[in-house]
């Protein structure tokens, strides 16, 4: 039985992970859960999964919980998350959203943990450092993102065989086919409505700008230790093929499935097992009867190229990309800017940045802070 | 460097295998080649690949070759093939067509060889015996058929994981969508013209009747030790997805590629390596930009159901299926019967057969002979 710590248990990935665990009680024991603000839902999870410890963002919430559930350890803030990440769980599910996942991931890597990894921003901001730390401490990152899980599955059994390309599929988001003029007019409500996946707000906007795919290119570069020029984005609106790997012999291995995040979550948690899951199977005669592939429009969706360029620049450039994007998405979610202001302002921030290299954890956090300040200044 | 014996070196698979070997001279040495009647082509192959031995069907051809190439051993007939199959090659490529592959496969299995296997009729006629013999002697069959190679590749890295279904793709052949009345009127020329693959005559007709897919179901049942009810046929006219495996967690792993038999041939010959092949890669934006899946029409293409029913009956029933089919395809190729006479007469032969079990090699050969006689009688 695996002990699982879930960082971000009340979010989209966290709740789906608990659903998988509930259906596979003989496989998993929940040791820690954490959330930022949805304390009511966290309480429900406490009752259902009886964790040993909980972590909240605020001290007052931890105090409240420790009084109400005296047999449970309650901690809070960054230190609480770091303790959970380096505690005695067998596997840490990092389903935090955004940059705040970086420090706990660093501590989990330093503690040699197996990390089920759903927090792509962390690898965008600090991929080099995290992968180096993981390698030095025999930690392992197992992807939870459906695309990266697919790639991981397509690489299984192919150790030592040369990969020609990773074919990273993209739904294209709700604005696939739009021209620049149309993109300028889209509303928050339209941007939040993803055609295939039901996801959190940040990732939905990233998907609409296609920055999500850019972030995934960077994530793949680090997770699979493969140069960016071998990673190609393929727009596949049906989201049935979750990604593919092309080998040197021209054979392409693909992973397909329903758009159900519980499948990659279960894969990472149970790895190297595959659990018997009673979810809806893929019906090739109806749901998946017609699959199409097309090129992404990098002219209109500029974020894709930003990601490749930032990777090519290396060092702090992807940290800046991530921080600027997080701030601008947040501003868009707060209805302070237009949809196209996201990519246009990212471009300005990237162009103004002078790249730094060989960053420590503190350096990364500093670059992140500075970038957020500069981005906010741009919007004033 | 692997020593390769090629049984059937002048056929479609044999020549493509030699093409792979020619492009990868540092990996392979051709030790034996064999052919039935294309002696001129065999001579070219002798000059190019300098094998240690050759096998022909007729004694006179072997005599001719042994005089002309005194440093090469020349043998003939079934005994010659059997000797090649059990000789000192590291890998036996069985690219014989039809039932005549059975006995050499049996000898290769008895000798504990690795067999690159392109001769599905052998497993249809005697799958139980061949797999038992292989298991007893640590022989291994590596699939060369593009579908079975795809399944094999999709199973790699998934040892011990439960397969829910094998999804065997079928182009549907040149008469996909035809009704019975249309099928009755098709000509030999139409039947020989496969929409996607360039293949030998026997397999082209099998593809047109969809018996090929039935034979492949039986082949998959034996190669992968999986019950027939877990093997589903999916019509996929573009022939880009070469087959898929669905696992218990609902994830589907697929293998895709161009319709180039050299890729699965190379996979089997080089296994567990993947060679770097300079063949045309799959272009998802053009060649594979639209993939469709549909159900096979088992009412019109009756051969599919014959295969499942014969597998369910077990014992000699699939031997009979294969023998009747070979004779009827041969009659159709000789323009002696109509296209639909193939399936209608297979049905008659199967219905008349009283199944026998636990067959020895001699039993299988006897059932085969008897069935051919009965089938010919039907046509008189």
Image (cartoon, coloured by chain):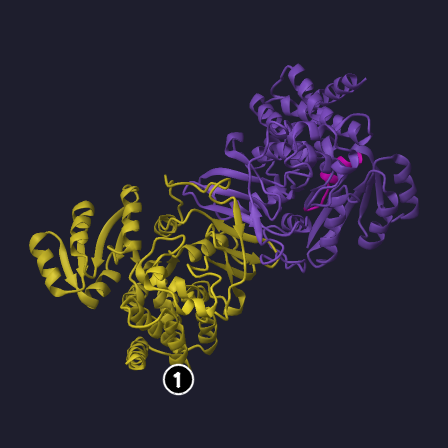
Chain colours: A purple, B yellow
Relative to A267, say whether A95 is above or below.
above
Identify which residue is drawn at 76% across, 37% down.
A190
The residue carrying mark 1 is B352
x 37%, y 60%: residue? B140
Binning the other alpha carbons within 10 Å of mark 1 as few (below 14), some (14 to 19) or many (20 upward) gives few
Q: Is residue A253 visible?
A: yes
Q: Is residue A333 rendered magenta in the image?
A: no
Q: Quadrant of residue A63?
A: top right
Q: Magenta residues, as a range? A: A79-90
Q: Is A118 left, or right, of B149 in this rendering?
A: right
- Tell me if I can see residue A83 in this picture: no
Q: Position of residue B310 (x, y in %)?
A: 44, 75
Q: Is residue B2 toward the left or the right of residue A260 in the image?
A: left
Which element is circle 1 on?
helix
Residue B145, quarter of picture: bottom left
The x, y position of residue A320, in whole percent, is: 68, 22
Q: Quadrant of the N terminus of chain A?
A: bottom right
Residue A97 falls in which quadrant of the image? top right
The chain holding disc 1 is: B
Nearest to the observer: residue B216 or residue A237: A237
């Amino acid at each position: 039985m695996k002990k699982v710590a879930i960082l971000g248990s009340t979010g989209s990935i966290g709740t789906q992970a608990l659903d998988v665990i509930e259906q596979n009680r003989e496989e998993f024991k929940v040791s820690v859960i954490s959330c930022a603000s949805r304390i009511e839902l966290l309480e429900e999870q406490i009752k259902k999964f009886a964790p040993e410890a909980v972590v909240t963002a605020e001290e007052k919430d931890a105090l409240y919980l420790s009084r109400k559930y005296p047999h449970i350890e309650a901690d809070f803030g960054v230190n609480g998350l770091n303790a959970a990440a380096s505690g005695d769980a067998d596997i840490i599910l990092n389903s935090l959203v955004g940059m705040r996942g970086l420090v706990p991931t660093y501590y989990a890597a330093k503690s040699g943990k197996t990390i089920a990894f759903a927090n792509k921003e962390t690898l965008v901001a600090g991929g080099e450092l995290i992968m180096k730390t993981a390698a030095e401490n025999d930690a392992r990152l197992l992807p939870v993102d459906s695309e990266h899980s697919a790639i991981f599955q397509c690489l299984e059994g192919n150790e030592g065989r040369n990969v020609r390309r990773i074919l990273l599929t993209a739904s294209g988001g709700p604005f696939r086919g739009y021209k620049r003029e149309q993109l300028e007019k889209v509303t928050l409500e339209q941007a939040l409505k993803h055609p295939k996946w039901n996801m959190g707000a940040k990732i939905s906007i990233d998907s609409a700008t296609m920055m999500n795919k850019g972030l995934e290119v960077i994530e793949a570069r680090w997770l699979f230790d493969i140069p960016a020029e071998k990673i190609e984005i393929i727009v596949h609106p049906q989201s049935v093929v979750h990604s593919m790997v092309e080998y040197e012999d021209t054979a392409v291995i693909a992973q397909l499935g329903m758009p159900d995040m519980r499948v990659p979550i279960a894969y990472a948690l149970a790895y190297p097992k595959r659990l018997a899951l009673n979810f809806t199977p893929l019906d090739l005669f109806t749901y998946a009867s017609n699959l199409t592939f097309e090129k992404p429009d990098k002219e209109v969706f500029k974020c894709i190229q930003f990601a490749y360029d930032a990777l090519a620049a290396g060092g702090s450039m992807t940290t800046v990309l991530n921080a600027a994007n997080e701030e601008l998405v947040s501003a868009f979610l707060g209805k302070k800017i237009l949809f196209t202001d996201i990519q246009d302002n990212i471009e300005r921030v990237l162009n103004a940045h002078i790249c730094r290299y060989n960053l420590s954890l503190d350096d990364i956090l500093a670059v992140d802070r500075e970038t957020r300040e500069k981005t906010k200044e741009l919007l004033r």
